[in-house]
């Protein structure tokens, strides 16, 4: 039973029949949801939110889009670096990125370290890897590797609508340094006459409480925000997101989390930049009305969640959502 995460051994006939009936209801429900595929995620009173898909490997691109997402809101590029002993070349990466650009794609730069291990990147063991050298911190220490990835993404940008997203930004200095390296790469490519889209948008993931608190300052220097609730909740509540002993504290609706999220959205709105959410919270239909009422422009989630969230959004008005918030 995948919905509850249990295995029933040797079910008796009653249980077996009950599951057949549940399977039938599940399939019927899925068919109903499939009809929403080409409909907009628009509230009863006409407010629209863009629903996008998270992608972990390029091979899944078609299947996530088949669920009705209008693009890829989070492309986790880590897969290119994991389970191999050498680093991927610029060419390897360019091919992988170009391949998914038939739709708009937000390419998140490398976020290894912590739970995601890349053997080809040398790193001293750390006592607290989730608080250690991961994501943008690791890239800013390995600038050669970072530049290779940025070149590959920029080269791919010539083939579609690409955006670049920096993970684990903790403050302005990191964002400025990352953008400065990106600018160097751009200048280098212009000199080499390599085509790319010069106005490629550059966003910051807001998933560390320090960044959430100064979101108003970061918003002045980013083209868009994407809220990573998986990490934001982990760091705000001081719980390891993989530790089941403290999983009960993993509360997306904790008032502290909601206040951080509200501040991020309000800061983005005040600065006139789009605000997206790409953590798991975005794909849980239970939270859709709250996120709508908070004012998100985009929600990015696993493909399967897209029609479920769409159905909820299409059933309420913006006023109802704001009142709930
Ligand atoms: C997040 O932290 O919410 C997120 C989307 O990134 P990841 O789960 O890859 O850390
Ligand atoms: Mg994260």
Image: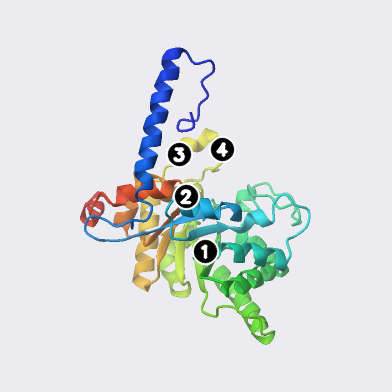
Q: Nearer the viewer, mark 3 or mark 2?
A: 2
Within the image, what quadrant is residue 48 found in?
bottom left
Q: Nearer the viewer, mark 2 or mark 1?
A: 2
Q: Compute the Cα span from label 4 to label 1.
A: 29 Å
Q: Between disc 2 and disc 1, whose residue precedes? A: 1
Left or right of 161, for residue 83: right
Q: Between disc 4 and disc 3, whose residue precedes? A: 4
Left or right of 315, for residue 82: right
Residue 36, given in percent of the width and then of the height, sits at: 35, 50
Using the image, tell me which numbered label, if any, was put on residue 106: 1
Residue under numbered circle 3: 249
Residue 264, given in percent of the width and then of the height, sits at: 40, 61
Q: Between disc 3 and disc 2, whose residue precedes? A: 3
In this orientation, which residue lies closer to the viewer: 201 or 1? 1
Is residue 255 visible in the rendered structure shown here? no
Q: Between disc 4 and disc 1, whose residue precedes? A: 1
Disc 1 crowd rating (10 Å Cα; few below 14, some 14-19, many 20+) is: many
Secondary structure beneath dot 2 equals loop
Q: Compute the Cα span from label 1 to label 3.
A: 30 Å
Q: Compute the Cα span from label 4 to label 2.
A: 26 Å
Q: Between disc 4 and disc 2, whose residue precedes? A: 4
Q: Nearer the viewer, mark 4 or mark 1?
A: 1
Left or right of 296, for residue 237: right
In this orientation, which residue lies closer to the viewer: 59 or 78? 59
Which residue sits furthest bottom?
Answer: 191
Is residue 83 visible in the rendered structure shown here? yes
Tell me the residue at 48%/55% (across/down).
Answer: 65
Q: Compute the Cα span from label 2 to label 1.
A: 15 Å
In this orientation, which residue lies closer to the viewer: 72 or 121? 72
Residue under numbered circle 4: 243
Residue under numbered circle 2: 303
């Amino acid at each position: 039973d995948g919905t509850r995460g249990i295995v029933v051994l040797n079910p008796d006939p009653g249980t077996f029949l009950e599951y057949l009936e549940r399977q039938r209801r599940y399939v019927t429900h899925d068919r109903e949801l499939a009809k929403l595929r080409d409909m907009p995620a628009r509230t009863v009173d006409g407010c629209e939110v863009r629903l996008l898909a998270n992608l972990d490997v390029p091979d899944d691109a078609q299947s996530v889009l088949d669920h009705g997402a209008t693009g890829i809101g989070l492309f986790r590029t880590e897969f290119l670096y994991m389970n191999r002993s050498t680093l991927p070349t610029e060419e390897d990466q360019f091919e992988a990125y170009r391949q998914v650009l038939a739709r708009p794609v937000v390419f998140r730069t490398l976020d290894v370290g912590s739970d995601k291990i890349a053997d080809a990147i040398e790193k001293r063991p750390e006592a607290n890897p989730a608080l250690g050298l991961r994501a943008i911190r690791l890239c800013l220490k390995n600038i050669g590797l970072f530049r290779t990835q940025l070149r590959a993404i920029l080269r791919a940008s010539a083939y579609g609508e690409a955006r670049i997203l920096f993970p684990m930004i903790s403050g302005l200095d990191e964002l400025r340094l990352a953008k400065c390296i990106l600018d160097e790469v751009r200048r280098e490519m212009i000199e080499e006459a390599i085509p790319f889209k010069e106005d490629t948008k550059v966003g910051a993931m807001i998933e560390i409480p320090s960044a959430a608190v100064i979101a108003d300052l970061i918003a002045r220097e980013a083209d868009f925000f994407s809220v990573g609730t998986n990490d934001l909740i982990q760091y705000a509540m001081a719980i390891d997101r993989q530790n089941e002993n403290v999983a009960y504290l993993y509360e997306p609706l904790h008032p502290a989390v909601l206040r951080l999220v509200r501040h991020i959205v309000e800061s983005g709105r005040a600065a006139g930049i789009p605000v997206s959410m790409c953590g798991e919270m975005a794909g849980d239909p239970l939270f859709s009305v709250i996120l709508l009422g908070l004012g998100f422009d985009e929600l990015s989630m696993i493909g399967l969640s897209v029609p479920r969230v769409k159905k909820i959004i299409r059933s309420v008005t913006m006023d109802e959502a704001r009142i709930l918030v």
